[in-house]
Image (spheres, rainbow, N blue to C red):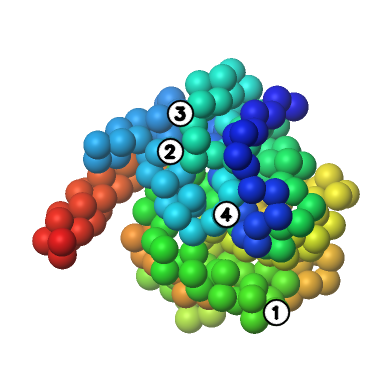
Amino acid sequence: MTVQAASDAVVDARTWVILVSAGRGTRFGRPKQYLALGPSTVLDVSVDTARAHADGVVLVVAPDRVDEHRADSRLAAVVAGGATRSDSVRAGLAVVPAGVAYVLVHDSARPLASGQVYGRVKEALEAGARGAVPVVPVVDTIRRVGAAVVDRADLRAVQTPQGFPAEVLRAAHAAGGEATDDAGLVEALGHTVVLVEGDPVNRKITTADDLVVARALYDELLDSEGENR
């Protein structure tokens, strides 16, 4: 595992973010996190938001991308990701200092996560939750293959950042298990995960069409910020 820590990294702060960005963009066709979003890139927007709402940010990237992020003063550490998402989270978690109270895990492919979403996750943890996951209602009609329509009133789409007390997340990953998100590993230990309000704008970029939508939404956000100055 390759690690690059900033010289002034905080080692005893309350909340850190692991920003997972090691994907190769197989479905997209190239690493989408390095494509333009407004005047920046998808990854840079995600880093800026994470840094604004955490005391330290660990960036997890593909092994051949570590060197290009070494000089980024926004980051507390840069590590090489693993073969799976869970492996990559474990690589990031390994460099989170022992004194950190809460760890949030976020996918860089969701660059439009708002400060409000980060805040709701952190508030749930400070209130005692063993895990906090932002969700949004499912708006499409869902049908099981060969079966009836599923009642969407009880369904929610899961987003990131997902947050956990550091010791809970470490225990969940200690066995080396795999899951599509960290909440699944935490629930496997018997913990209850709290659902908090997400944001429909906090979309994951998976396809080229998703990037088009994200760019349009980001431009709207920039215009809105300009009008409010």
Q: Earlier in the sequence, mark 2 or mark 4?
A: 2
State the image coordinates of residue 198 (x, y, percent, origin top left).
Answer: 45, 69
Write down the residue under mark 2. Answer: 43
> Of circles 4 and 3, which is in front?
4
Compute the Cα span from label 1 to label 4: 20 Å
Marks 1/3: CA–CA distance: 37 Å
Q: Position of residue 158 (x, y in %)?
A: 53, 63
Q: Disc 1 designates what residue?
A: 128
- Pointers 1 and 4 in contact (C-beta within 8 Å): no
Picture layout, residue 151 above or below residue 219: below
* 9 lies left or right of 74: right
Q: Which residue is pictured at 60% across the width and 76% down the height?
A: 124
Q: Are marks 4 and 3 in contact (CB under 8 Å)?
A: no
What residue occupies the far right of the structure in this picture?
Answer: 175
Three-letter code, disc 4: Asp
Please tell me in which quadrant of the rendered image residue 4 appears.
top right
Q: Quick one: SS at disc 1?
A: loop
Out of 121 and 213, give the one closest to the viewer: 121
The kind of secondary structure element at disc 4 is: loop
Mark 4 highlights which residue?
Answer: 55
Taking 4 as reference, is 160 left or right? left
Amino acid under disc 3: Pro
Alpha-carbon span between mark 1 and mark 2: 31 Å
Q: Which residue appears farthest toward the front when viewing the image?
A: 8
Q: Quadrant of residue 202?
A: bottom left
User: Label 1 amino acid?
Assistant: Gly
Q: Nearer the viewer, mark 3 or mark 2?
A: 2
Query: Which quarter of the image is occupied by the C terminus?
Result: bottom left
Numbered tag placed on residue 31 in the rendering: 3
Residue at x-position 57% and y-position 54% = 55
| Rendered location of residue 11, percent (x, y) | 70, 49
